[in-house]
Image (spheres, rainbow, N blue to C red):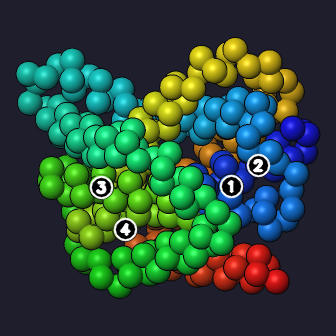
Amino acid sequence: MELFTATLLALLQGVTELFPVSSLGHAVLVPAVLHWNVDFQSPEFLPFLVAIHFGTAVALLLYFWRDWIAFAQAVINFREPDNKDERRIFLYICAATIPAVLIGAVLEKLVREAFAKPLIAAAFLIVNGLVLLIAERLKSRGTRPLQMMTLKSAIGIGLAQCLAFIPGMSRSGVTLAAGLAAGHDHEAAARFSFLLGTPIIVAATVHEVPKFLHSGAAWQMPTLVACLVAGVTAYASIAFLMHYFRKHDFDALDPFAYYCFAAGALALALLLI
């Protein structure tokens, strides 16, 4: 893969993985619409994919390192009552991760092969925008902190996460929508969404590491640059989104919904011409 193409794809991944606009949908649509010469079946593509996800995972861990340290301390010192809130949130992250692990192990390949077509990805990008718009209109006006999350809500958010196996449906988007439906404000919902995404992205990366290390393309310059670019872009995206949701708690998902409508409709038009 050429360095320029690898850098553009890494930038795309770093932004769309965390913004509620579907990284998988963009990965399917952008090369198809712009006629990029990207061979997704190439032996070089897997190490590239692992590298950009590794960059995203590192960005998530670096931004939320205090949370993960607090979770580790809460688990180790499980008898300390002062750590009960962190312990509860960590347990809810684990509970919410289970549906994606189970469903992903059984259905992920089947779902992605069935839906990973540009026209279908464009249509589901529009559906993703509709989900964001509806979530804003139907959300509770409460401001429940994560400490008040229930196990039922956590599992509901975890089930919503499974929709992201469909290209065009955003993992962060559907989990944010589910968090709002559970009565949390945008900042709390975003924090849980990003914390929930960390083990999934890390696990997916670790699973492919042996193949990555045995690949001749793993240490080539385009792959290494893509890893760095994806990591830096992802960190900047997290920082921006957390600030944005902290300052905007009224119809904050609307701009992303309108983007999904416009991008999906434009992609459909270009693909059908």
3D distance between C-alphas at marks 3 and 4: 12 Å
**113 or 212, nearer to the observer:** 113
**111 or 188, nearer to the observer:** 111
The amino acid sitting under disc 4 is Ala
Q: Earlier in the sequence, mark 2 or mark 3?
A: 2
Residue under pointer 3: 159
Query: Which secondary structure, mark 3?
Result: helix
Residue under pointer 2: 9
Q: Residue at x 61, y 44 (%)?
A: 235
Q: Earlier in the sequence, mark 2 or mark 4?
A: 2
Q: Nearer the viewer, mark 2 or mark 1?
A: 1
Asked whether the beta carbons under mark 3 and mark 1 sit within 8 Å of each other, the answer is no
Asked whether the beta carbons under mark 2 and mark 1 sit within 8 Å of each other, the answer is yes
Instruction: Note whether 15 is above or below 130 in the view shown.
Output: above
The reply, left or right, for residue 12 in relation to residue 157 is right
Q: Earlier in the sequence, mark 2 or mark 1?
A: 2
